């Protein structure tokens, strides 16, 4: 199948390109830079340099390729993860996902693409009992920074799933880990902060995180090309509270145990930090297992911690 990937050289884009090639798809990747074009050539696929905000250029590229499926992985996130950096990047990331994504989606519809797959969020679910499933509401009442991201994802899902022209799939990924991510065990920016003891457990540390290895996310994305349309949580089998996963992650990357700060001390870092630490809900992946043949690996640092007990 011919597949067009927008955002082909990011943390998820690179393993996705590799997975698509391994599955014998004909792949064209869209990137915003000449450096990204070289990355795609190194993977042995065709690349096009296109500004996602240029609707005419996006339309021309997709019309020329005439793919059967389009996968949208557009993001504009900072290289290093900190609350300040995320806040600074939020507006451009929002515009790229909404305006750039809309350009890609409209171009796909005009080119009569059959399937459209888009990135969404699997960790911003609203409060409730137990782990969240796809029909549970997202966290629209979260602190402003998170609620803004939630509204962005909801608009994206409404656009893609509400289309009459293309069958849409929204993949609600968990927190990425693995090569090229913030949680890369060697060079990730979160990893470096943990090693420097700048990433504390906050308050009760009861926020439940759902992670996903980028290669497992890529495998689910390839499967979504031929799946039933709809929404899928693409998260691993090991949702864990911050007070559990963060010390285990520190040990996994040979870092000292993380410090602990109170909720009051965390107020100066912004309400989003406190929300992550104490209110994240975590998600279930049953539907992805059933419909996508999804089989994620164990969360590496929890698996190692359990073996050590």
Image (tube, grey):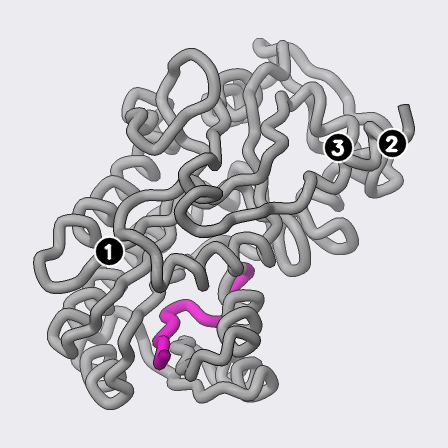
Q: Secondary structure at mark 3?
A: helix
Q: Residue at x 62, y 54 (%)?
A: 181
**Image x and y of residue 251, in percent:** 85, 34
**Image x and y of residue 60, in percent:** 20, 86
Q: Residue 96: name its quadrant.
A: bottom left
Q: CA distance from mark 1 to mark 3?
A: 34 Å
Q: Residue at x 16, y 78 (%)?
A: 111
Q: CA distance from mark 3 to mark 2?
A: 9 Å
* Residue 108 left/right relative to 84: left
Residue denoted by label 1: 168
* Residue 80 left/right relative to 260: left
Segment colored magenta: 1-11
Q: Earlier in the sequence, mark 3 or mark 2?
A: 3
Residue denoted by label 3: 302
Quick one: 13 or 197, which is closer to the camera? 13
Q: Residue at x 35, y 65 (%)?
A: 71
* Residue 308 left/right relative to 166: right
| Circle on res. 307 | 2
Whether label 1 touches label 2, CB < 8 Å: no
Q: Secondary structure at mark 2?
A: helix
């Amino acid at each position: 199948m011919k597949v067009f990937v927008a955002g082909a050289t990011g943390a998820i884009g690179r393993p996705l390109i590799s997975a698509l090639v391994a599955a014998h798809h004909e792949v064209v990747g869209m990137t915003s830079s000449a450096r990204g074009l070289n990355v795609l050539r190194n993977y042995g696929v065709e690349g096009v340099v296109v500004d996602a905000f240029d609707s005419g250029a996006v339309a021309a590229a997709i019309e020329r390729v005439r793919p059967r499926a389009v996968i949208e992985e557009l993001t504009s996130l900072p290289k290093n993860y900190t609350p300040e950096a995320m806040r600074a990047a939020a507006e451009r990331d929002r515009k790229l996902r909404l305006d750039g994504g809309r350009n890609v989606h409209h171009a796909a519809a005009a080119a009569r693409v059959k399937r459209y797959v888009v990135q969404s969020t699997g960790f911003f679910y609203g409060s409730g009992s137990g782990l969240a499933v796809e029909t549970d509401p997202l966290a629209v009442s979260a602190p402003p920074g998170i609620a803004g991201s939630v509204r962005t994802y909801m608009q994206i899902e409404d656009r893609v799933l509400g289309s009459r022209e293309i069958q849409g799939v929204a993949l609600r990924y968990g927190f990425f880990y693995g090569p090229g991510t913030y949680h890369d065990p060697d060079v990730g920016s979160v990893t470096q902060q943990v090693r420097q003891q700048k990433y504390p457990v906050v308050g009760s540390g009861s926020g439940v995180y759902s992670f996903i290895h980028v290669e497992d996310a890529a495998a689910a994305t390839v499967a979504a090309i031929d799946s039933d349309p709809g929404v899928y949580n693409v998260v691993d089998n090991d949702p864990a509270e911050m007070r559990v996963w963060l010390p285990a992650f520190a040990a996994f990357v040979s870092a000292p145990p993380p410090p602990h700060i109170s909720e009051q001390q965390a107020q100066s870092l912004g309400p989003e930090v406190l929300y992550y630490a104490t209110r994240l809900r975590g998600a279930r992946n049953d539907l992805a297992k059933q419909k996508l043949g999804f089989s994620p690996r164990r969360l590496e640092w929890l698996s190692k911690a359990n073996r050590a007990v």
